[in-house]
Amino acid sequence: PHSMLRWDGSSWTASRVPLKPQEELTDSAFSSGNFGVLVGNDFHDNTATTNAVAFVWDGSAWTREPSMEVADLQAVALLSETEGSAFSLDGGLLQRVGGSWQHTDTPGISSLRSSFYTSGSPSMQIVLNGSDEGWMMGGRQIWHWDGRQWRESYRSRLDLYDMSVVDRERVWVSGGDWKTHDHTLIMWNGAEWAEQRIDVSEPIVSVSANSVDTGWLLAFHSQTGKGPEALY
């Protein structure tokens, strides 16, 4: 079961989502305090049905959206009530247009689905930082939104775990390999991706940057094997 909590400026309070027992949530996105979207899937006997589920926050309550007719929704991002993107392993990419979700014909999207399924990373992320600028990460691939279409932008040698978008000229993506303890850290400089070699010997599970000269990495501690313990 999932719980959704809301911060009102002084405390966290539970926010009821009208989920059915077999439904599970995978991601959420908000464009303001008065609008947000929750996405997930309807499971029966541990198998996704043909329909994913989505709920909309209107500032006071969550309500169910009409069927999206896809399965296995993994990620969602919003710019406004009428603009957003979502990714389904079953149906590919959806764009929010005029308050409803529409399928987008995206050449090559099957390779992203395959990469997600075959990688050791369960992470799928979408970040939109403008109507003509967005990034999506999953498996070993990074895709870019230019305002018209999603296109593959980079293919990593290792699984990808996290993404941090600073602005149009600085994006960080981290990853690694649990078996070999290798890591990858990739930076977008506004024109191209470049892998950054740093002095760590473990997968980088998280990256967070809030400016071009400030950022943090969280790496899995390979010597103890107890989990992510190293901060850089």
Image (cartoon, rainbow, N blue to C red):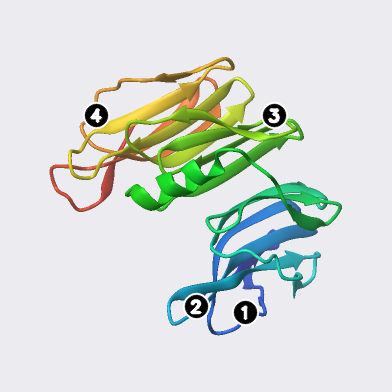
Asked whether the beta carbons under mark 1 and mark 3 sit within 8 Å of each other, the answer is no
Cα separation between marks 3 and 2: 37 Å
Which amino acid, by three-letter code, is at mark 2?
Answer: Pro
Residue located beneath label 4 in the image: 200
Query: Which residue type carries mark 4?
Result: Val
Rendering quarter of residue 100: bottom right
* Residue neighbourhood size for the residue with mark 3, other residues' Cα within 10 Å, grouped as few (<14), some (14–19), many (≥20): few
**Circle 3 sits on which residue?**
146
Mark sitting earlier along the chain (1/3): 1
What residue is disc 2 on? Answer: 1
Q: Amino acid at mark 3?
A: Asp
Q: Position of residue 51 (x, y in %)?
A: 62, 71
Say above or below: 204 vs 12.
Answer: above
Instruction: Name the mark nearer the viewer: 3 or 4.
Output: 3
> Earlier along the polypeptide chain: callout 1 or callout 4?
1
Q: Report how far apart the C-alphas of labels 1 and 3 lie in the structure.
A: 35 Å
